[in-house]
Structures are given as C-alpha cells and as structure tokens.
Image: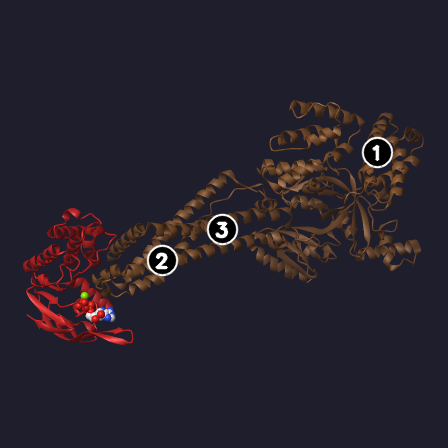
Chain colours: A brown, B red
Amino acid sequence: MRILSLLRILSRLALRDLWLRKIKTLGMGGILAMGTFLIVFGLSLLEDIEGTMKNGIIQSVAGHLQLYSKNAKDSLALFGGGFMGREDLAEIPDYSKILPSLLDHPNVAKVIPMGFEMALLGRGNESDELFDSLREALTSGDTEEIRSREEQVKFHLNFLSKEFEQGKKITADQKLLAQQTSWIAEAASDRFWLDIRLGPENKMQFLETKIAPLSGEKSPVYLRYLGTDPQLFQNAFSKFKIVSGEMIPEGKRGMLLASRFREDFLKILPARKFDMIYRKKIETGLSIATDAELKRIQRELALQHRPILTHLDFYETERLRGELVGYLEERKEHPGGSSDSLEDLLKRFLVVDDSNFLSRYNWFYEHIAPLVRLYEISPGQTIVLRSYTKSGYVKNVPVKVYGTYSFEGLERSDIAGQFNITDLVTFRELYGLMTEEALQELTDIRKTVNTQEIAKENIEAALFEGEPVVSHEPDAFSSSTFVDPQITAAKGLAEDYRPEALRQGLIINTAIFLRDESKLVDTQKELEKRISDLVPVNVIDWKKASGIVGQFIEIIRYVLLFGVSVILLVALIIINNSMIVATFERTQEIGTMRAFGAQKGFIAGLFLIEAFLLSLFASGVGTLAAWGATVWLKSVGIPAVHDVLVFLFSGSRLFPNVNETYMIAGPLIVVVLASISALYPALLAASIPPALAMQENE
Amino acid sequence: MSVCLQNVTKTYPLGDSEVHALKGIDLTIEAGEFVTVAGPSGCGKTTLLNLIGCMDVPSSGLVKIDDRDISSLSDRELTRLRRENLGFIFQSFNLIPVLSCEQNVEFPLLLKGKLSAKERMRRVHELLEKVGLNEQSKQRANALSGGQRQRVAVARALVTHPRIVLADEPTANLDSENGQKIISLMRDINENGKTTFIFSSHDPSIIALARRVIRLKDGLIASQT
Ligand SMILES: Nc1ncnc2c1ncn2[C@@H]1O[C@H](COP(=O)(O)OP(=O)(O)O)[C@@H](O)[C@H]1O
Ligand SMILES: [Mg+2]
C-alpha cells in the first residue's frame, strides 16, 4: 500500500516535472519515439521482406537446400555472385550415385538436378533474316511472295546505299567502299532480280556473301541457362509458369527462354525503349521532364526509327505511312506536308513527352508492333548456342525454343528473371566434359570405325560432331547462326533422349525440397555427411545458395540496427546528460524532500520514473506510429520502384504485416535502455545531502 | 522532545584548509520552547540548526535528541527521525515549484504514509486555514507572493504534527511586516500546542519576538537566556 502511494506521488511529481520542462521532454521524447518507430516498423518490414524473398528464392529455383561439389572453387550463387555469373563450380560426375541416398532421407521430399552455365547466343544480322525469307520464297515459287520479298530487300538496299553515301566522307579505304557501293547497285538492279528468278542459287550466294556482311553484326548476347529435368522442375517450383509457347516436351531436347531475358535482350529496340519508359513513367510514376534517366531513354527512343523501317516491305511502308499521317494530323502534330516519308513521320512519332507518351505507346503496340518481328527469337525456332567447354573447345549446339517462362511475382525482377531453362542433356553437351560414359562410347566408336589414330585432343570432335569444332577464327559469328533443323540432324545430335539420362550422369548441383522445413538445419548436416561418404559435397541453405541477394537482407538489417543504435545512443546520452544537469538544478528541491524524510530510494525513484514515463510515452507514440504506418501500407502496398525491390518483395508490391513481437520488444528495449541511462543521474541525485536544502545559492 | 548538545564542534573542509563553523557548543532545549539562534552572518547558525535537524552529524561532541545520539544513526534512521519528529522552514521557502500549495503541504504526509487521502486533506486544509491560505490551496506554489509562500512552508512544516520545527532565517527573504507575521504565527502555534520552535535570525526586531535567545559568535555561544 505504502509502495503504491509512494509510486503514485512519484509519478505525479515525475509527470509534473516532465510537463514543466516541455521543450526538453518533447525533444527527448521525439528522439525516443523515432528510435522506437525504426525498431518496430523497420525490423518488422524487414521480416516481411525476408519472408516474401525467402518464398521467392525457395519456390523459384533454390528449394530448401542446395547440394554441390566440395571441389568447387567458388561457392554456389544461384542469383549471381555478382560478376558475370560464371562461378567455378566443380561437377558431380554421376548423379545416379547420390540420388537414391538423397531420396532415402526421411525429410527429403523432392530432388531436382541442376547445372548453371553461360553460352553465347548466335544472332545473325538484319540482312540474314531478310535473305533467309527471300530464299524460302524462291524455293516455294510463290510469285506474290517473291515480289513482296524483293521489295523488302530493295528497301533494305536503299538504306545501305544511303548509309554508304554518308560513310564516304569518313572511310579511309575509298577503293573498298567504291566496290561495295557497286555491289549494292548490282543487287538493286532489275537485271539482278530477273536473273534470281531464273537461277536463284548463284544470286542468293552473292547476296549472302557480298551484301549480308555490309549490314554489320549485332553484338553477341550471353545467355545464362539452367540445365535440369524440365518436368521435375515444373512440378517442384510453384512460382514457375509458362508465359508463351509450350513446356519442353518430355524426352525432347529444348529450351525455355526466360521471359524477362527475351524482353530485355531479344525484343526489337524501339519496343524495348517504349517498355522502359512505360515502366518508369506509368508504373513507377516518374516524369520524363524531371527524371534524368527517363530523359535519356526518351532521347534513345527518338532515334529508333531504323529497326522499324527495315522490317517493313514496300506495301507495309505505304500503309503505315498513311496511318501515321492520320494519327499525327488528328493530334495536330503533323504540319501538313503529306509528302513526308515514313522515316520523317516515324522520327516525329518517336519523340515522346509526358503528355503524349501513353497514346504513342498504345499506338505503337496497336499499329506498328504487328508489322515488325517484335522478338528476335520466338517459340518454335531453333537457336544455336555457342559455349566454351570445360575442355577448352568451342562447341555449337542447336536447341529448339519451345516457349518462354517466368516466375510468378518475379516477372519484373532482373535478378530472378534472367536464366533460361534447358534439359540436362543439352546442358551436358554444352558443358562438354568427358564423362566415363562418353569415354566408353568413344572406345566403342573406335572399335567400329577402327581408327586408332584419333588424337587425344580431337576426342570431342570425333565424338560429338561430324565436323571440326575447334574454332580459331576470332570472328566466330560472322556467318548466320540461325540454323535450320537439317543442320542439327547433320551434326548427329538427336532431338530426343532417353528419360534415364536425367537421373544419371553429370550434374553440378541439386535443389532439395524438404518435408519439414523446421528441421532444415539438421537435415542439412545429415545430408552433407551422408552424401559426402559417396562424393564430397557441400549442402547449403536457400539463403546462402541465393548468393549476394540472400545476404542483402542481412546487410539491410545491420544498417538498420546500426542506425537505430546510433539514434538510441544519442537519445540515451541526451537523457543522461539532461538528467545530470537537472540534479544540479534541483539540488535544493531534492535537499528539501530529503529534509522532510524522503529516503535516498525515493529520490532515485523520482528520476528513474521520470525516464521510465518519458520513454514509455515516447515509445508508445513511436509504436503507434509504426502500427499506423504498417496498417496503411498493408492496405495500399509498398511499390517496388527498383528491380532489386521486385526481387526482395517477390512481386511489384509489398503488403507489410503488423508484427506483434516487435511491437512489444521495440518499446520494451527503449524503456529499459532509457531507464538504464537514468540510473547514474538517479544515484547522483540520491546522494545529495539534505543539508543542501538549507544552503542559500546567492 | 528535548535537544541536548555537548561540546559540539563542526569542521568543514575548505580546499586545503578547514573551517571551524562550531567550536564547542553546550546547549539544552526543552520541549515546547520558542528559541531563536541569533548572530551575524557566518557565525554558525545554519550549521547548528542542521545538527539539531538531524541533517548532518557533528565532527566531535554529542547531539542527542531525546537522549539518542544522532551520530550513531544511519542515513535511513536519520531520515526516519526527521520524517517522524521534525519540521522545516527555510529562508527561501523551498516549496516544490511543480506542486500546488495543497500538494506541497500534503507532501510530508505522503512520505509518512499511514494516513488516508481524506485524513490527509483534512489536515492540509486545517493548516492552510490556520495560515490563512485556504483560498489559494489549488494555486501553484510559485504563483504566490513571498509572504504567502512562507506561510505555505509553515503549514508544510506543521502538517505532520512534528515535535520540533526548525526554521533557518525564515524572515530573511521577507519584508519586515511579513516577517513579523510569520514569527507571530509560529508563536501562536507554539503557545497553543507543544511544538518546539527553533529559528535563527540576525534581525533584532525578529529576535525580540523570541522567548529565549541564544547568541552565537564565531562558532561559540556568546550568551543565552
Ligand atoms: N558546507 C560548507 N563547507 C564549507 N564551509 C562551510 C559550509 N557550510 C558553512 N560553512 C562555513 O562555516 C561557517 C558558518 O557558516 P553558517 O553555519 O552557514 O553560518 P550562518 O548560517 O550563521 O551564516 C561560515 O564561515 C561558512 O563559510
Ligand atoms: Mg545561515
């Protein structure tokens, strides 16, 4: 009872003191409230992000655990270790040796074999595509089609000659230039087109060897791919979904392009620029007028008439010109020169600003996109991947693209959306390391062909391809690398494979799904031990396996904790200091209380309660603010304004949850710390002798 | 409750040297007396009152309250002794500025505990009535005039019904009219009850109001009546 009434008077005194020193109270309280807000809001937000990111990582490619060889020089980083993404990981020579042992573990639900690598994607150039379709038309004999292609090629030649006109002024080798100009003139002549209808082969070769190289080469694209068991992959990873085309059929070699990769690297440039502006302007809400990055993209878009023009034939050009005049006139952006060329009109059309962007964007996709080949590669097409194998050879492997895919919620993420999926058989082909199996096969070939003279260096050449694969020319991409299926057959690489191939042979790593995630740490250790008896392996959890991004959240957490610590430290120092000052200011008051019989504990309690109440109110306010902010953000969502955020949020918006643990822990920590910092001033005050009440401070 | 001092000295350290504030005091004050400690500034009045008020212990000699030697008591015990038996009035009133008059007067009662809120309020108002400040009871202490404040301080000193009230120059910060009023108020209370009053002063007109005068000079008793 006495304690209670003492506490009552203590808090009354403390409250009155706090009230009397309003400015000081507000200052200290403000800092404490801010610290609490940061703890409660920041940490719970981080936990939410960690949750969504974790789900994104596990359900897209990592699984709960990842297993890879202990001989690896680098550690596994599924979303890139940061640089070029080509880690030096050792191979696990025979998957069939470890698979039964893995599946035997009671907590293992699914095992998905994997291997990551990079290859170059052959792309050809604009002329190649044109001449390919011309060749097709000539073979078919369809006169309409041939006529249309002729127009297209002539249109292209017209471009080339214009380019060469300009080139004249800057090129040093005037003789070569003159010769090339004459080739273009020849190809554009009526005589040439008469002849090509009579005897195509000769003239086609002229186009392909003399004219095609003039268009210049597109820069090669690196393609990161994951070799796996496609069917198993599809079943195991819930975020995986086909976007266009179809799934790689069972037992067929094939590839699924990452939708994001296709958008970013294989889409026609003007469309890509339109998309980039759309994302930044419409989805993120930036403005072209003020955002420097947007402005730069806008300027680039303005120069993109050329890729559109090359895709159009004569008739399409005329039609589009008419439509574009109509569009621009309607919006009073066309000064009226009806004789303007399509090039001039497009140049005007592609200059966008904040007010006309959406209209231009929609018109582009409605009227222009259908006329051009929007993507360089589409489902159904066969591409050639060029890899530098582990044994040092260059190897070209054709593979059919069946479709495109993405990970649900991570569609826009650069980090998760950039690897393409293929089967393990194609992967091994590109990886190109001799397996025992392959060596055995080679011995068999030797017997049948009866050639003892196959030199060791040529083993691969003999085994995999009908022609030498060792490439010494530096300009390896000078010729068209889009290959028709016949070439595939000629190289003796079957489109089909036996399903067993996916359960044996070389792999790099496996994803492992667990039945009970709570036993992750134990299972991780057990599996590592169990498998290492067969092959030395590392087993790591999803966070570690994800590479830098997995650690990213830890980094943010440390930064946040550091920030909170600094704020709290400042707050505590201020509390400590101002209370010490207060003990001096209040000496007489304290002495008086002591004279009237207040014990030392009472005086100490007065100061402690003051700090306690102040921090309680302040942290209450901070917690309330954090709660309010969270509830509000839960209803509207936090937009992922950056690609990294898309990955972290596992979607384009994050809907944070109220986290009760932090709502209790946050204020508790602040109150305890504030009380601790009041401890010294409290003891100092308690040691003031009662006689000081009598002393006059003149 | 009697106070007895035997050969009391008090020495304060002052830098490297010492100040001998009291040099050997022998003094007895019986219950119910109305005593003033007189003398010029620096003669040791405050020091003497501090010792009698159990706020400090002597350097040598004995200070006995009801035959109890205060030097043998701990800080806790001294504090309790003050709380139960003593009341204080200070030169600069020393009211707690954040509290109202009522709460200031109530404060010693709260420290003492034991009483119910109702009983506390009854006593508080009884005393505020006595000092003529019932009307200002809700006002913040630092909103009052000097004379009013000192009257609140008198009420506070008396609210626990102490046996001895110590007042160190209670009139020093008041004009002579208010000073006189405070002393007569104290004297009234002394005459109507058993409370001992010991106050110090260097003002002759105030000293004249005391029944017994102890004159100090340089830490020694020069004369007493
Ligand atoms: N805490 C102290 N420390 C040092 N000297 C003190 C202290 N208190 C009082 N003194 C000295 O002791 C002497 C007596 O002081 P005090 O009792 O306050 O006299 P008075 O109240 O009569 O003016 C003075 O010389 C004073 O300077
Ligand atoms: Mg004095």
Distance from disc 2 to disc 1, alpha carbons, whole Å, reads 83 Å
Image side of residue A591 versus residue A195, left or right:
left
Establish if A592 lies above or below B18.
above
The crowd level at tag 2 (other Cα within 10 Å; few <14, some 14-19, many 20+) is: some
Disc 3, SS: helix
Disc 1, SS: helix
Q: Position of residue B84 (x, y in %)?
A: 17, 62
Q: Position of residue A310 (x, y in %)?
A: 78, 33
Q: Amino acid at mark 2?
A: Ser
Query: Residue A157: which disc?
Result: 1
Chain to which mark 2 belongs: A
Please tell me which residue is depicted at 18% across the width and 69% down the height of the picture.
B42
Q: Hey, which residue is sitting farthest front in the picture?
A: A169
Establish if B123 lies above or below B222.
above
**Eye-nearest disc, 3 or 1:** 1
Q: Amino acid at mark 1?
A: Leu
Q: Position of residue A92 (x, y in %)?
A: 72, 57
Residue for badge 2: A578
> Quick one: A606 or A73, which is closer to the camera?
A606
* On-image quarter of the C terminus of chain A: bottom left
> Quick one: A57 or A261, which is closer to the camera?
A261
* Label 3 or label 1, whichever comes before in sequence order: 3
* Label 2 or label 3, whichever comes before in sequence order: 3
Chain to which mark 3 belongs: A
Q: Amino acid at mark 3?
A: Leu
Which quarter of the picture shows residue A290?
A: top right
Residue for badge 3: A43
Distance from disc 3 to disc 1, alpha carbons, whole Å, reads 62 Å
